[in-house]
Amino acid sequence: MQNRRDFLKRASLLLAGGAVMPQLLTSCGEAAAPKKHIGLQLYSLREMVKDDGIQAVLETVSKMGYTHVETAGYDNGKIYGLEPAEFKKIMDDLGMKCTSAHLSQAITKDNKDEVMAWWDRAIEAYNQVGAKYLVQPSITIDSNTTEDDMKMYCDYFNAVGYKTAAASMAFGYHNHAFEFQHTFDGKFAYDYLLDNVSKQHVFFQMDVYWVMMGGQNPVQYLKDRPTQFKTIHIKDEKEIGASGLMDFQPIFDQMKANNVKDWYVEVEQYTNNNPVESVKQSYDFLAKADYVY
C-alpha cells in the first residue's frame, strides 16, 4: 500500500510529464515533417561556381534546403571539373542527390558518330553519380530550319534515348520560347517534336516560364500530354513568385495529377544582382506554398 509521500511523488512526476510531453511531441512532429522535394538547376548560380567552386555552391544550396540538383557543368567526362566519383561524394556528404543534368552536342548530318561517342562517355559519367535524367537544353530552330532538320533532331533524340534507356536513364529535351515561334507541317516546332519522337525513349522537360513567354499555357500542355513531361523547370522572370506573371498553383496541381516526381528551380536574372539571395528567396517562396509538394 503506497503512503501519502509516495502518492504525492508519483503525482508530481505525472504532472511534470504531462507538461513536458506535448512539447516533446510537437518537437518530434516538427523534426519528422517531410521536407519538400525542391530541386535546383545549378545554372542559377553559374557565377558563384566560377568564383568559389562547385563544393561551396553545393554547401550553400544544401543549407537553404534544396534536396537535389540538376547540373550544367559537364565536360569531357568530368562534372564541374571533378571526376564523377568525387562529385558524388560531395553530394552524398551533404545528403543531396544529383538527379539530372543539362548537357548537349550540336548534331549535323556529318558528325553523328562523333556525337554518339560523346554521349556514351557522358552516360557513363552520370551513371556513376546516380542521375536519372539527361537533358538537351536547346537546339537551333530559326528561320533557316527546315522540316528535314526537324526530322534529323527527332532521329537524334531517339538515338540518344535508346542509349540512355539501356543505362536505366531517361533522355529529354528542355524548351525555350522559340519553339513556339516557328511552325512545321502546320504545328509549332515544340508540338512537332512532341509528336515525332519515340515517346518511350524521349521525354520533355517543360520550362513553364518559357512556355508562357511563347504565348502558350503550360497547364494545358500538361493536361493534353500527361505522360510526356517527366521533369519541370519552375521559373519566373527573376525570383520565383516575385514577378506576378506566373500562377504556380495550377501548374503544381497538374504536375501532381500527372505524377511528376522531379522538378527544378531555375533563376536566370536576379534582383539587386544577388544570385544567392535570389535562389534562397525562390526556395523560401516554394517552401511556404501549401500547393508545393
Image: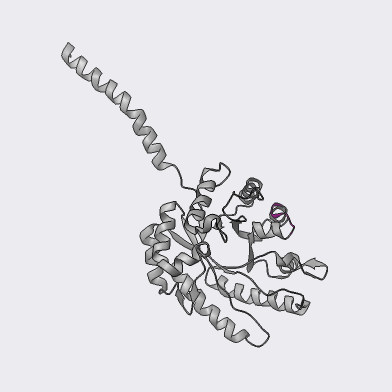
Residue 130: in sight, yes or no?
Answer: no
Where residue 271 sits: x, y (%)? 55, 55
- Observer-nearest residue: 287 or 262? 287
- Asked if 53 appears above or below 34 in the picture, the reply is below
- Asked if 178 appears above or below 148 in the picture, the reply is above
Q: Quadrant of the N terminus?
A: top left
Q: Residue furthest front?
A: 272
Where residue 97 sits: x, y (%)? 45, 60
Q: Quadrant of residue 212?
A: bottom right
Q: Please report the bounds of the magenta region as a residue range.
A: 215-219
Where residue 90 sits: x, y (%)? 38, 64
Residue 275: in sight, yes or no?
Answer: yes
Where residue 225 sits: x, y (%)? 70, 57
Q: Quadrant of residue 29?
A: top left
Was residue 47 drawn as part of the magenta stretch in this picture?
A: no
Q: Residue furthest top?
A: 4
- Asked if 271 appears above or below 14 in the picture, the reply is below
Q: Quadrant of residue 18?
A: top left
Q: Residue furthest right?
A: 186
User: Is residue 145 found left or right of 267 in the rendered image?
Assistant: right
Task: Report the magenta stretch's main SS.
Answer: loop
Q: Residue furthest bottom?
A: 110
- Observer-nearest residue: 23 or 215? 215
User: Is residue 225 found left or right of 31 in the rendered image?
Assistant: right
- Observer-nearest residue: 109 or 224? 109
Was residue 216 drawn as part of the magenta stretch in this picture?
A: yes
Applied colour scheme:
one colour
Numbered marks: total: 0
The residue drawn where x is 51% and y is 46% is 287
